[in-house]
Amino acid sequence: MFPLKNHSKMMVNPKFRSIAKSGGKKMEVLKGQEALQALVGVLPHIVKSLPEDMALYVTDGEKYLQAVEGADLPIGITVGSKVWGKATEKCMVEKRKTTFNVRDGMPFKGVNIPILDENNNSVGTIICATGRKKQQDVNQVAEQLADTLDQMAGAMNEIASGAARLAEVGQALTEKAQLSDKKIAETEVIINSIKSISNQTNLLGLNAAIESARAGEYGRGFGVVAQEIRKLADESKHSTEQVKVIIEAISSAVKNMILSAEESGAISQQQAAAIQENTATIDELRNVGLKLKDFAAKL
């Protein structure tokens, strides 16, 4: 296509040189075949100053005239082998820099730069290849980070839902305990009323026994009834006292339950707040992971 013949014996032709001025000094700019020859000679030196995951090549459009590869980018291109793909041909035809990506085998990103002669015709290209393994490693780490954070976010959401549910249960338990405490207070009123009735009944029984004694033989039967009434009143009083003790114990347990429920609700609210903060932090880390992934894609 654009063969370079006897490039190893080529002499520099002054007509292929142009003169450029830089900082007031004259600088020779090689063109055409001279540029190809110069690149073939200096490429092995240039590559030593580059990262080890880079490679440089010179082509005449059909084959590689020079190939130097870094230790971390052993693509395997050799001098004299046929040029890969269509990127080089496109670069020479369009006379502009072109880029391409190789994803199979040893992945790398390549840049093709045309070499022009004094008539602006393409005589070859120089190719700079940069390894993409580091990019892939960063991208893989970013994806793993994003997946891990997604899992953490899901777990935190479940914990947050559980904490919110626990707070709701604690609130409901507090309300029920408060209602039970109210009912116990009402029960105590009833027990006090029963106790008052028992005392009054006992007093009436005592009066009946006194009257029975005054009636003598005629009041003996009524005295027996009065005695049983007093006995029943005493038993009622004793029973109410026992019930009162039990209700006081229940009341104490209910009040402790209210305190525990309120404490549990407070802890659940604190946990929910802490979980929200952790969730916000995880979201920030997810954003960092996404930025890292985008950065890796641009490497």
Image (spheres, grey):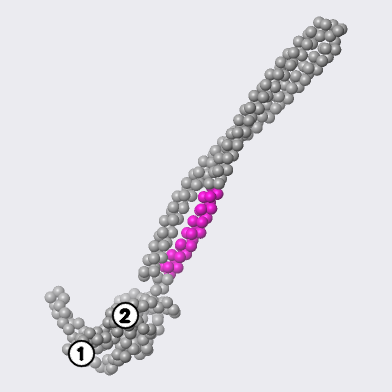
Residue at left 32%, top 76%? Answer: 50
Disc 2 crowd, CA 10 A, few/some/many (<14, 14-19, 20+): many
The answer to whether residue 248 is left or right of residue 123 is right
- Report if the CB atoms under discs 1 and 2 are less than 8 Å apart: no
Q: Is residue 152 magenta?
A: yes
Residue at left 82%, top 12%? Answer: 223
Quarter-of-image position of residue 24: bottom left
Relative image position of residue 80 (x, y in whole percent): 35, 90
Relative image position of residue 230 (x, y in whole percent): 77, 16
Residue at left 17%, top 89%? Answer: 15
**Marks 1 and 2, how far apart at CA:** 24 Å
Q: Is residue 132 magenta?
A: no
Secondary structure of the residue carrying numbered label 2: strand
Secondary structure of the residue carrying numbered label 1: loop
Query: Tag 1: residue type?
Result: Val
Sequence-earlier tag: 1 or 2: 1
Query: Tag 2: residue type?
Result: Asn
Residue hosting label 1? 12
Q: Nearer the viewer, residue 135 or 99?
A: 99
Relative image position of residue 61 (x, y in whole percent): 32, 87
- What mark, if any, has residue 284 been given in the picture? none
Magenta segment boundaries in residue numbering = 137-163
Residue hosting label 2? 112
The answer to whether residue 75 is left or right of residue 26 is right
Disc 1 crowd, CA 10 A, few/some/many (<14, 14-19, 20+): some
